[in-house]
Amino acid sequence: MFSSKRVLPAAAFILGVCAPKIARAQQSVVDSVNVESVVILPLGLPASGSRNVVAVRAANASFTVKPSEKGQVWALLRSSRREVSNAVAARSLRATTTGDTVQIELARALTAPGHLDLGVPLGAALRIAGDNGGEVRIEGVRGSAEVTHSNGGVTVLDATGHVLVATSNGNVRVRLVSVERGVPMSFITNNGDIDLTMPADVRVTLLIDDSIPLESDFPLVSSGTAGARSRLRRLAVNGGGPTIRLFTDNGKVRFHRL
């Protein structure tokens, strides 16, 4: 006979994993946009006249970003609101292009929490600005990413180049498969943990307050503080390199080797 103490945690785990997907499936599609023929060359180098930067801004919405097929940029807005945009109703999303940048933003404020599913070309540089909407998750795009958010966690997996993240009330998780040399990065949250994974041969210098708990797979060599009275420690990884600023008010930092 199975013990209820074992069954209940298992059930809770399943609900915890599946609940966001179930909730999203119950949301209705409010609006969508599509930008055709965005071509990205290998290593993120744009062809002449191509668009290789995708900038997205939305409040009261969570985000999921994944690679798209055929070099397109597309966005699908879902909401618990049952009304769906049509030819008469006002559009909820707006897409514009300027030079090499595709800009996607809300055309009007959301009346209920929404979710943005985004598809971008492999290797695109991302600039995400969110506010008060839940998690931002970027996975498999393999470009650089800059994310500013509030009241939500940020996850960036398998990025290349550089990543900047600033959020509040959420964890930050970043996995970089390659790092752009000579470019500083920062990972900041006011209330949450920071989990950072980088290649084994990465050469960087961590800048972190000495009050923040730090766990590292890499040997860390202290190179002093940022000033005579500063509590900011400089910790060299593989001899040191560009600065990575790490900050959390209420959490810990974990630094992993890829």
Image: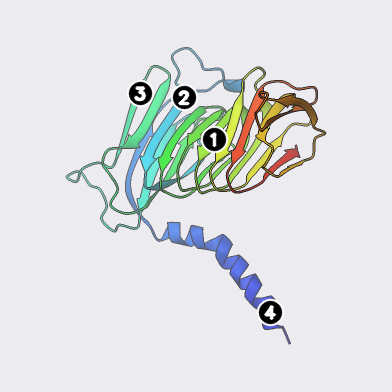
Q: Which mark is residue 5?
A: 4
Given residues 173 and 225, the one toward you in this image is 225
Give the distance between the C-alpha atoms of the residues marked 4 and 2, in whole angstroms. 50 Å
Label 2 vs 1, first from the N-terminus? 2
Q: Looking at the image, do the residues carrying marks 4 and 1 touch, with CB atoms under 8 Å apart?
A: no
Residue drawn at (42%, 40%) of the image: 130
User: Nearer the observer, disc 3 or disc 4?
Assistant: 4
Q: Is 9 on the left-hand or right-hand side of 90?
A: right
Q: Are marks 2 and 3 in contact (CB under 8 Å)?
A: no
Residue 139 sits above or below residue 244 on the image: below
In the rendered image, which quarter is residue 240 located in?
A: top right
Image quarter where the C terminus lies is top right
Q: Position of residue 62 (x, y in %)?
A: 44, 47
Residue type at the position of mark 1: Val
Circle nearer the N terminus (4, 2): 4
Q: Looking at the image, tell me whether mark 4 or mark 1 is earlier in sequence order.
A: 4
Q: Are marks 2 and 1 in contact (CB under 8 Å)?
A: no
Residue carrying label 2: 53
Disc 3 target residue: 97
The amino acid sitting under disc 4 is: Lys
Q: Which residue is mark 1?
A: 165
Q: In whole angstroms, how far apart are the C-alphas of marks 4 and 1?
A: 39 Å
Q: Could you say where residue 195 lies in the image, as x and y percent from the top left?
A: 66, 43
On the rendered structure, is 94 left or right of 179?
left
